[in-house]
Image (cartoon, helix red, strand yellow):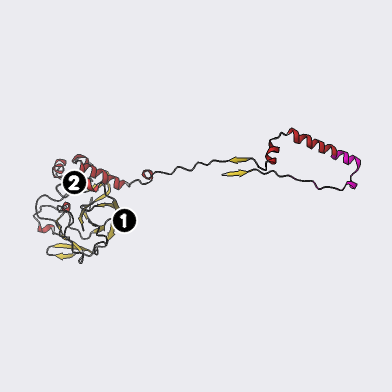
Amino acid sequence: MRTTRAALITKTPARTPSSRTPSARAALTGAALAVAVLGVTAGCTSGTAEAEGTAPTVTVTSTPDPVPSESATSTASPAVELVREYLDAAAAGDAAAAWALLTPEAQAFYPSEQQFTSAFGRDGTVTPEAAGQLAGATFDEAEALEGAVTVVSATTDAEADAWVVRESSAGLRIDDAGVPSTGDSVYEWTNPAAGAEDVQSDAGAASFDDSAPASLSFASPASADATGPSTVGYPTGLFAFVDGVETPVDEPVSAGSGREFTIPVGSASTDGAPRGLTVVWQVGDAPASFRSSTVLL
């Protein structure tokens, strides 16, 4: 930015010669001589500038404020960072690292950490191959149950999955227990025709009739050969999310001894991009834990 300093000159109004006395004229003559002498002794710099018709200038250089880099301004939320860490562990086949990121309630689903290690990636939890693909996807997150849980989801052309992140007695952890390895199926997707539980989630998009709502059914625990409460749950209600956006779920209807839930998701997107549909439900009351199931539409 440039600024210019201008000289301000004040002139004294002139009087007519007849009004001046000799002493006054003498005083003026002396003052004029003094001004002339001062003009000479002041140096020739200002005189030269005035003769050239220019004025001295001052240049001010301003330095713009640094612009924060994208990496410094686009930090992921703690829930997303936790899911990324979990996927990194799954992609590397590091079951011990993945185990440490689960809630105590999810860990309690397994008889031991060794059992989790032997079943990891084959019991409905994310496989190493799917984890490698999903880790590079864009993550969506949404809150449910008035912020009690955060659902972090990711969708690619061939994979879709989601994870329930919440505060637990061990801190921020993931509810991601597998499905029972024995016994009857506890729940299954009927539209899309993905079959029982999460075990078909890595087979790509299943056949989906978009003229009808998405649907899945839960078998009554009483209909299964079980000696204790269902570890998967028999929900009276679900939360559903399509690519991270919550969508309404219809009231369940009786389906034999079980319950069937329907989720109106509408027709496929105009660009043909796949969508990930995730349902979340609560298991138990004290302490409560949550389960989820995701299909690719």
Question: Which residue carries the number 2 mark?
Answer: 129
Counting other residues with Cα less than 10 Å from the Cα at mark 1, is it few (<14), some (14-19), or many (20 or more)?
A: few
Does the magenta segment cover residue 211?
A: no
Q: Amino acid at mark 1?
A: Glu
Which region is colored magenta?
9-28
Counting other residues with Cα less than 10 Å from the Cα at mark 2, is it few (<14), some (14-19), or many (20 or more)?
A: some
Query: Between disc 1 and disc 2, whose residue precedes?
Result: 2
Do residues under tags 1 and 2 come within 8 Å of each other at their CB atoms? no
Q: Position of residue 35 (x, y in %)?
A: 79, 37
71 or 16: nearer the viewer? 16
In the image, farthest residue toward the bottom? 211
65 or 17: nearer the viewer? 17
Q: Position of residue 120 (x, y in %)?
A: 16, 45
Q: Residue at x 10, y 56 (%)?
A: 224
Q: Amino acid at mark 2?
A: Glu
**Among the 4 quarters of the image, the one containing residue 222:** bottom left
Question: Which residue carries the number 1 mark?
Answer: 146
Q: Is residue 148 visible?
A: no
Question: Which quadrant would the C terminus be assigned to in this image?
Answer: bottom left
276 or 69: nearer the viewer? 69
Q: Position of residue 203 (x, y in %)?
A: 15, 53
Does the magenta segment cover residue 11?
A: yes
Which element carries disc 2, helix, strand or loop?
helix
Q: Residue at x 56, y 41 (%)?
A: 60
